[in-house]
Image (spheres, helix red, strand yellow):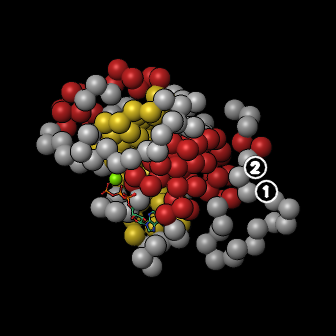
Amino acid sequence: MKVVTRSVEETRALGEELGRAVLRAGDVVVLSGELGTGKTALAQGVGRGLEVDGPVVSPTFTLVREYDGRVRLCHVDVYRLERVQEIHELGIEEQMEESVTLIEWGEAVVSALPADRLEVRLSAGAGPDERIIELVLLGESWRHRSLRLAEIVESRAPDEDHQAPAGDEPGDGQELEAS
Ligand SMILES: Nc1ncnc2c1ncn2[C@@H]1O[C@H](COP(=O)(O)OP(=O)(O)OP(=O)(O)O)[C@@H](O)[C@H]1O
Ligand SMILES: [Mg+2]
């Protein structure tokens, strides 16, 4: 599944929708993509969707930041890890069950992550503010949520034709309520 965003706010909005309507405690999300592609921006949106207190800021130097919210958010950046094994020293596994765990540069440590996970792959698009965001669903729990994700992806303005149906409330998302 693929989404194209054309501003940092659109990327945050996608994250917010994921946080609001899809993610739940125990989820692990790998955020991958080159420097500045918007991994942290997406995480900021997830924070909004999870209603965490305080703005989500990059964990590049602290490696791990945690936020209380409707669901707890654990935001990790493994860019500075030298060995995959070091991920076990961050103390994030103890809290994975109760948190949504987002891992920037997580593609480097997938061998140490649960097989069941969402991978969000960001890359540069055509213009300076365009990003291509690919969602890859791995494992049973994500297979069950693929329809819900597809709905979100489709509700983000389709690439060429911006013909949102009249009267359609963006962000209302009632159809996503049932689980
Ligand atoms: N469509 C877009 N989506 C996300 N960010 C965008 C977009 N267009 C422009 N930007 C800009 O790109 C930058 C993304 O920065 P961000 O810190 O989120 O990236 P990152 O992938 O976390 O980088 P790093 O690898 O350093 O952690 C911001 O300056 C943001 O304003
Ligand atoms: Mg970042």
Count neighbours of disc 2 (C-alpha within 10 A) and say few if under 14, some if 14 to 19, many if 20 or more. few
Q: Which residue is mark 1?
A: 169
Q: What separation in Å lies between label 2 and label 1 (alpha carbons)?
A: 6 Å
Q: Which mark is residue 172?
A: 2
Name the residue type under label 1. Glu
Q: Is residue 108 left or right of residue 44?
A: left
Q: Tell me how many marks there are.
A: 2
Count neighbours of disc 1 (C-alpha within 10 A) and say few if under 14, some if 14 to 19, many if 20 or more. few
Name the residue type under label 2. Asp
* Residue at disc 2, secondary structure: loop
Q: Is residue 91 left or right of residue 148?
A: left
Which quadrant of the structure image shows residue 87? top left
State the residue at coordinates (30%, 61%).
35
Tell me if the residue at label 2 has its CB under 8 Å from ligand 1: no
* Residue at disc 1, secondary structure: loop
What is the x, y in percent for residue 134? Answer: 47, 58
Is 75 in front, or is 151?
75
Question: Vertically, is 151 above or below 88?
Answer: below
Circles 2 and 1, Cβ within 8 Å, touching? The answer is: yes
Q: Is residue 108 left or right of residue 18?
A: left
Q: Residue furthest front?
A: 54
Is 12 in front, or is 156?
12
What is the x, y in percent for residue 139? Answer: 47, 36
Q: Is residue 24 visible from the viewing direction of this image?
A: yes
